[in-house]
Image (spheres, rainbow, N blue to C red):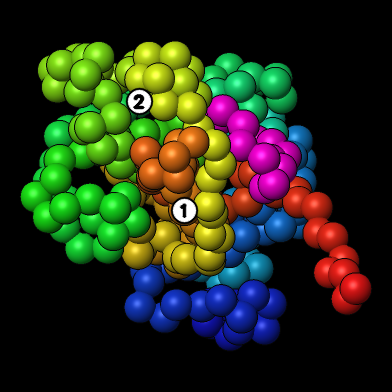
Amino acid sequence: MLEDSIAQSENTLIRQQSLVDQVFKILYERIISGVYPSGSKLPTGDRLAEELNVSRSTVRMAVSKLEDRKLVQRRQGVGTYVRELIKIPNPLNEFIELSNLIKDHGYQPGYSTLADIVELDGEMLEILQLQPGSKVLQQRKVFTADGDPFIYVVNHIPVWVFEHVISLEEALKPDLTDKFVEFFEVICKQKISHFVSTVRAEIYENIDPPKELVDNEPQTPVLVINETGFNEEARPIVNSCEFHPGNWMTFQMIRRLRSNM
């Protein structure tokens, strides 16, 4: 049975999933982990069907899901090949504009933005040191590399930061923070002194993903980087939360030995 095959080789079975989703998950994890490396040809449908003890139609639908995710590419009369996966190193110990980071590694950057002016409540009020009922600009951004969506970012910017230089209507323009640092330091005259960041692991079903990323599996691991930027008066002027599903981006940091002196 397929369940036995998965238990022996993958140990990741979610029994409530359909057979198509189970086969998709196996193939997805093999691609992400490098079992099927970029540029390699997937085993034939017959071979996968025999290995996993499912029908060819099940394999075909699972591979179609991989194709929808732009993980594989079908070549007429040749076979199905694993696409080159986006791998971008990102140093955790310094702030780099995401568009610049994508461009510097040879990909064409892009993004889509949904923006709104909202009233805050709960924890974010405390993070941004605001009074109840305070309004912020909320931006939900999906960054792409060569057209492939792979980073989801939610920004919260207090209205007081920009209300003296632009109107609320202008604040809703999708390209407002295209040049993130320039927006604060040049337009708003709020120089960013530093960021305070936290990093945690999450799973995909818990992050309220935008429609561009809904194809990710619910149990897909997500690295969450939440950081608050402060001005020179140590007042918070932005909270930014980045969601990195899968392993499209690798992270680097410098860890120094703690001195006992």
Q: Does the magenta stretch include residue 89?
A: yes
What is the chief secondary structure element of the magenta stretch? loop
Mark 2, residue position: 112
| Residue 231 sits in quarter | top left
Local secondary structure at mark 1: strand
Of 261 and 258, the residue lying toward us: 261
* Image position of 242 (left or right of 258): left
- In the image, which residues are magenta? 86-98
Of 248 and 22, the residue lying toward us: 248
Q: Residue at x 69, y 47 (%)?
A: 93
Q: Residue at x 35, y 25 (%)?
A: 112
Vertical comparison of 3 with 25: above or below: below
Amino acid type, mark 1 = Asn
In primary-sequence order, the first of circles 2 and 1 is 2
Local secondary structure at mark 2: strand
* Image position of 91 (left or right of 239): right
Q: Which residue is drawn at 67% across and 47% down?
A: 92
Label 2 neighbour load within 10 Å: few <14, some 14-19, many 20+: some
Quadrant for the N terminus, please.
bottom right
Q: Can residue 44 be seen in this view?
A: no
Mark 1, residue position: 226
**Residue that lies at the very extreme toward the left in this rendered image:** 133
Vertical comparison of 22 with 140: above or below: below
Q: Distance between the residues labelled 2 and 1?
A: 20 Å
Q: Is residue 135 magenta?
A: no
Q: Position of residue 253 (x, y in %)?
A: 76, 51
Q: How many labels does the image show?
A: 2
* Image position of 228 (left or right of 259): left
Of 102 and 134, the residue lying toward us: 134
| Residue 51 sits in quarter | bottom right
Quadrant for the C terminus, please.
bottom right
